[in-house]
Image (cartoon, rainbow, N blue to C red):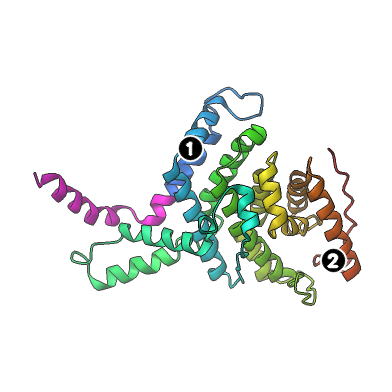
Amino acid sequence: GAAPEVAALALSRLAPRLCGRADAVGWLWHTVHGLLAGPNSIEDGDGATATATVLASAMLGDAAFVCLAAEEMAEACSQLASAWGLQWKPATISQEACTALGLELTDLDVHALAAAAADDGNTDQLDGAAALPEEVVEQEDAASRLWARGAGGPFEELMQAALALSMIASAGGSSSGLPPRLTGLYLIANVALIEALHARRFGNLVSGEKTKKGTDPEALEAARACMLVEQVRLCGNVLYGQPRAQSFARLTRALRAVLSHCYADNELPLLREAGVFAVRNATHGNPENQQAVRDLLAERKAAGVSDGMLQPPPIELEFAD
């Protein structure tokens, strides 16, 4: 009767020696992305394959999967900010914003989600009775650096999976979209990282900090490592055809953040395209958001804010109903 338990204990001690958490999560999200982006099915009318649509629906309908995706993205953003010396400060969410997504405040406690991911990762460590002290310390140190590499590491796999899931989920219009918890998490945790990267290069525009020229090579390296373009693109995907997500963006800092990235950047040439796409999706068919953008642009013009560019081209938006 005890044989299964003994086998499970033995496996739990052996597994960390065969595959660390970084390898495991990297392969997990690589597999998710591969399944969703693979060429094995015929494309449906929205550009996603029929198989990918079914798979994405199954994944996003699984509460445990959604919880894991939210926890690991929160942990990743936190670790990346720490590794690159960024001031990552997720917004305090109002009850009104949570209500827009049908959530409670506790559902979007980003720091709690990040901590939960770290706790889950401890199950991959060596059992204390079977490991030498230096082995335990080494694994704990590795866990703290799991996402720190950014592009080229497990974080890139996580981001690619998030982009694929968000694109497929939003393709069905307002009747589908991502689960509310993932929507809110991306528009808080990832937006906070976008803001931190922007502040690192150009200064904190919200607080009125003196604008920098954006030529700091380390700040640019951080933007690339943290996949800034993909982060903005993820926000655009989340907002596509989703009225509740649009409202949440207006009631938090997300709308302001994506609007701050509609400028030409020679170092990140695809950033403006991603920013304009995100603003378009945030305002399409939403008069309240359209007015909010007009107000933000007027506010910036009055304050002389240039988003870090010395003479940025004017942003002209034509809103479609």
> To which quarter of the image does residue 48 belong?
top right
Q: Is residue 130 left or right of residue 77?
A: left
Say few, some or many: other residues with alpha carbon within 10 Å of mark 1 (under 14 / 14 to 19 / 20 or more): few
Circles 2, 1 touching at the beta carbon (< 8 Å): no
From the top left corner, tell me how far across and down residue 33 is, in percent.
52, 40
- Mark positioned earlier in the residue sequence (2 or 1): 1
The circle drawn on residue 16 is none
Question: What x and y, as percent, mark residue 219?
Answer: 67, 69
Nearer mark to the viewer, of 2 and 1 = 1
- Residue at 77%, 76% in the rendered image: 209
Q: CA distance from mark 2 to mark 1?
A: 42 Å
Question: Mark on residue 61?
Answer: 1
Per the rendered image, the range of residues in magenta is 1-25
From the image, tell me which residue sits under label 2. 306
Of all residues, the one furthest to the bottom in this rendering is 210
Where, by quadrant of the figure, is residue 193 drawn? Answer: bottom right
Kind of residue at disc 2: Ser
Name the quarter where the N terminus is drawn.
top left
Which is the main secondary structure of the residues drawn in magenta?
helix
Query: Dot 2: what SS?
Result: loop
